[in-house]
């Protein structure tokens, strides 16, 4: 696609429910990233994918968080048993993924605003 | 110690002045450094990247890198009210595609 697409743009859920957030990267981009941004805060790294594999899951806050990527394209971030502290904007980004350390530019989606009541 | 540190601000400068934004990082092996701009309610967008020690200029923006001091900065010349945003410093972890972001510095350019 023309840009990174995320859905839904807004999600309101009740504490304890599971949610799924979707990211559709730019076509051809092999690297995909998930970040979380709480109000007034910077970007907190969650996980990144190179193709379908996730070399670094170190940022996932707890085992309630999981992510997968299929076909080297769409990724889903799942949060189980949501808590109020999970409320944040979840940003997805993609990059070409073949110029390690060089002109590797991250393109961000518009984010999903998650509110846990 | 945070991996990437920035002063949260706000940094207020008058229109036409030079805005100086600073960032320090902890991983001495980091190799790529980026400045992203984020307007309120919007997603970050890349404005500068730098890989070698020294200065890199692009229009009104200059990125400066000092690997010995583990310090990267962004200068904005002739600041405009439209430059008012949060500026995020990002560092590429050695040998990976992992990008660590600072908490950002909020810049306010006063007309």
Image (cartoon, helix red, strand yellow):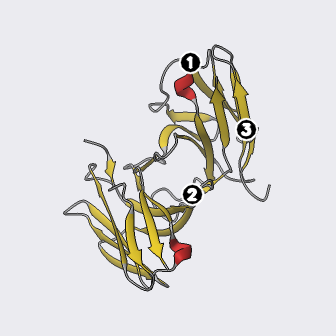
Q: Residue B44: which numbered mark, if any? A: 2
Q: Nearer the viewer, mark 2 or mark 3?
A: 3
Question: Vertical placement of B71 versus A17: above or below?
Answer: below
Residue A74 seen anywhere in this rendered image of the structure? no
Q: Position of residue B55 (x, y in %)?
A: 34, 78
Secondary structure under badge 3? strand
Q: Nearer the viewer, mark 1 or mark 3?
A: 3
Q: Earlier in the sequence, mark 1 or mark 3?
A: 3
Q: Residue A10: which numbered mark, if any? A: 3
Mark 1 residue crowding within 10 angstroms, few (<14) / some (14–19) / many (20+)? few
Q: Using the numbered discs, state the Cα–Cα distance from disc 1 to disc 2 in whole angstroms.
A: 27 Å
Q: Residue furthest front?
A: B111
Give a yes or no on whether discs 1 and 2 share a subunit: no
In this image, A15 relative to A47: left or right? right
Q: Residue furthest right?
A: A1
Give whichever of B74, A100 is nearer the camera: B74
Can you tell which quarter of the image residue B61 is in? bottom left
Q: Are marks 1 and 2 in contact (CB under 8 Å)?
A: no
Can you tell which quarter of the image residue B2 is in? top left
Q: Which residue, given by chain and number where applicable, does mark 1 sit on?
A: A64
Q: Residue at x 45, y 68 (%)?
A: B108
């Amino acid at each position: 696609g023309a840009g990174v697409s995320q859905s839904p743009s807004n999600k309101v859920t009740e504490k304890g429910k599971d949610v799924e957030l979707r990211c559709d990267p730019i076509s051809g981009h092999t690297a995909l990233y998930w970040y979380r941004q709480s109000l007034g805060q910077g970007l907190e790294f969650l996980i990144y994918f190179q193709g379908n594999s996730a070399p670094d899951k170190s940022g996932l806050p707890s085992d309630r968080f999981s992510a997968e990527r299929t076909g080297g394209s769409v990724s889903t971030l799942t949060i189980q048993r949501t808590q109020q502290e999970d409320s944040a904007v979840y940003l997805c980004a993609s990059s070409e993924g073949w110029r390690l350390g060089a002109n590797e530019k991250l393109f961000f989606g518009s984010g999903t605003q998650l509110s846990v009541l | 110690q945070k991996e990437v540190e920035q002063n949260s601000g706000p940094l207020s400068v008058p229109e036409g002045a030079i805005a100086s934004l600073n960032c320090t990082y902890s991983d001495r092996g980091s190799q790529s450094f980026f400045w992203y701009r984020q307007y309120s309610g919007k997603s970050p967008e890349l404005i500068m990247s730098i890989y070698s020690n020294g200065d890199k200029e692009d229009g009104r923006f200059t990125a400066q890198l000092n690997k010995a001091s583990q310090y990267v900065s962004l200068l904005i010349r002739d600041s405009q009210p439209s430059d008012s945003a949060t500026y995020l410093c990002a560092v590429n972890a050695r040998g990976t595609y992992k990008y660590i972001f600072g908490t950002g510095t909020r810049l306010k350019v006063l007309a």
